[in-house]
Image (spheres, helix red, strand yellow):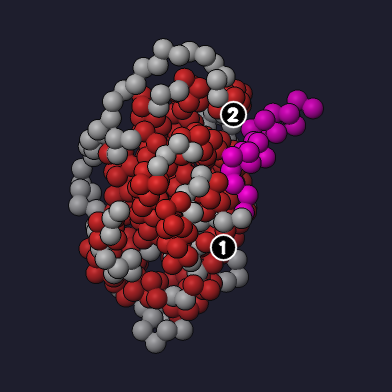
């Protein structure tokens, strides 16, 4: 059992100095190399459908493929300021209300111009981090094809590799052609993706990527989808979400079987990994790079964001609305004397534990088949 110092590299989850000390040190490099420490596993058991839920998911994935070049209308003109005004509505300052009223607020003198600029930068930043995360998913899923011992899972994971290539492609294209290019990867996200890729245990790839990173992405895409009226981004998100829901289901269905067999000590290691991932993702949403680009005092902003009372952090909490019920379904909340439950209480996200998990929910997200049926009717 590890201490927070060992899990997070700091003894206090909210240690401001330790959080801002994590920075991206190889921004000028075009490539980044990570050891993946894993054996490639052949299986000689070719019995298709030995795991019916995974087989069903694989068959669904084969008929739900789409083409980012031809299924999205790239001729649509995008005005980033208009997108932002729709996303932010009449209350651009909403999520920062507590900070604005703080005597030490770096946002005190923000007017309409600055709020719009912050919105545009945040949109660029957020979509950029999604894009980098999608590449993480591409690499992780290729790794799962190699490392998972079950044929049904290898088959399914191969379809996810294709899905993730498409996701990286469409986010990169949207950022380059419709917005103003992309932000480098956030240091906290990079640290998390590196940790996931480096772990030699096949289930940790799933836990880090399918449950934590993709669980958060599914929730985040859902908000953005609901709030935006920009037709290209809206359809892009709708299609990505219909893939993403399958990916999270793949994690839940695979790990459910595997975790049922693990000892308490092994479960505790998974809980610690899930907690580490949750904290890294929360840290990334402090969006240090955006403050820097806006010329706002990033240290002050991060400090105030960490001090914002939990009841003012509804958006950040909602990002965990898929992760927590899925962790519960896997037995991760309550194993080892409810260790992860207590940690999720501390970071203010346990309230989602009884929301729908994603094990079956993926069928409701299937936008591609729905559109195809509508077109042929
Ligand atoms: Fe994806
Ligand atoms: Fe995915």
**Residue 253 location (% of width, % of height):** 54, 35
**Residue 186 location (% of width, % of height):** 32, 53
Decide: few, some or many residues near mark 2? Use Cα within 10 Å; few <14, some 14-19, many ≥20. some
Tag 2, which secondary structure? helix
| Magenta span contains residue 375 | yes
- In the depicted structure, whether residue 65 falls above or below residue 117: above
Residue underneath mark 1: 351
Question: Farthest residue toward the bottom?
Answer: 103
Compared across the picture, whether 208 is left or right of 256 comes to left
For the point 59% across and 24% down, which residue is it? 52
Compared across the picture, whether 40 is left or right of 234 comes to left
Tag 1, which secondary structure? helix
Residue underneath mark 2: 53
Give the magenta range. 355-377
Foreground residue, 306 or 177? 306
First in sequence: mark 2 or mark 1? 2
**Residue 43 location (% of width, % of height):** 40, 16
Question: Does residue 223 appear in the picture of this structure?
Answer: yes
For the point 45% across and 36% down, which residue is it? 261
For the point 53% across and 73% down, which residue is it? 311
Q: Quadrant of the image for the C terminus?
A: top right
């Amino acid at each position: 059992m590890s201490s927070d110092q060992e899990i997070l590299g700091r003894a206090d989850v909210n240690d401001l100095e330790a959080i801002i000390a994590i920075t991206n040190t190889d921004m000028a490099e075009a490539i980044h190399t990570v050891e993946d420490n894993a054996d490639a596993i052949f299986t000689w058991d070719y019995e298709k459908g030995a795991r019916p839920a995974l087989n069903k998911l694989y068959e669904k994935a084969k008929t739900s493929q789409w083409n980012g070049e031809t299924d999205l209308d790239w001729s649509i003109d995008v005005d980033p300021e208009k997108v932002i005004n729709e996303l932010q509505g009449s209350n651009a300052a909403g999520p920062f209300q507590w900070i604005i009223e703080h005597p030490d607020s770096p946002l005190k003198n923000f007017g309409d111009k600055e709020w719009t600029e912050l919105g545009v930068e945040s949109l660029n930043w957020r979509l950029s981090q999604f894009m980098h995360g999608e590449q993480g998913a591409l690499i992780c899923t290729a790794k799962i094809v190699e490392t998972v011992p079950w044929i049904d899972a290898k088959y399914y994971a191969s379809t996810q590799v294709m899905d993730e290539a498409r996701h990286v492609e469409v986010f990169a294209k949207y950022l380059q052609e419709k917005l103003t290019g992309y932000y480098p990867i956030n240091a906290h996200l990079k640290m998390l993706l590196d940790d996931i890729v480096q772990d030699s245990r096949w289930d940790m790839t799933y836990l880090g990527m399918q449950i934590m990173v993709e669980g958060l992405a599914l929730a985040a895409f859902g908000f953005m989808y609901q709030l935006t009226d920009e037709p290209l981004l809206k359809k892009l998100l709708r299609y990505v979400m219909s893939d993403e829901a399958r990916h999270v289901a793949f994690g839940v269905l695979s790990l459910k079987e595997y975790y049922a067999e693990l000892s308490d000590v092994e479960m505790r290691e998974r809980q610690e990994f899930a907690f580490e991932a949750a904290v890294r993702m929360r840290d990334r949403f402090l969006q240090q790079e955006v403050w820097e680009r806006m010329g706002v005092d990033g240290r002050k902003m991060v400090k105030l964001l960490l001090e914002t009372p939990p009841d003012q952090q509804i958006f950040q909490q909602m990002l965990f609305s898929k992760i927590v019920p899925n962790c519960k379904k896997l037995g991760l909340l309550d194993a080892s004397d409810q260790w992860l439950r207590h940690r999720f209480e501390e970071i203010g996200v346990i309230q989602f534990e009884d929301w729908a998990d994603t094990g079956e929910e993926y069928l409701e997200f299937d936008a591609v088949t729905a559109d195809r049926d509508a077109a042929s009717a």
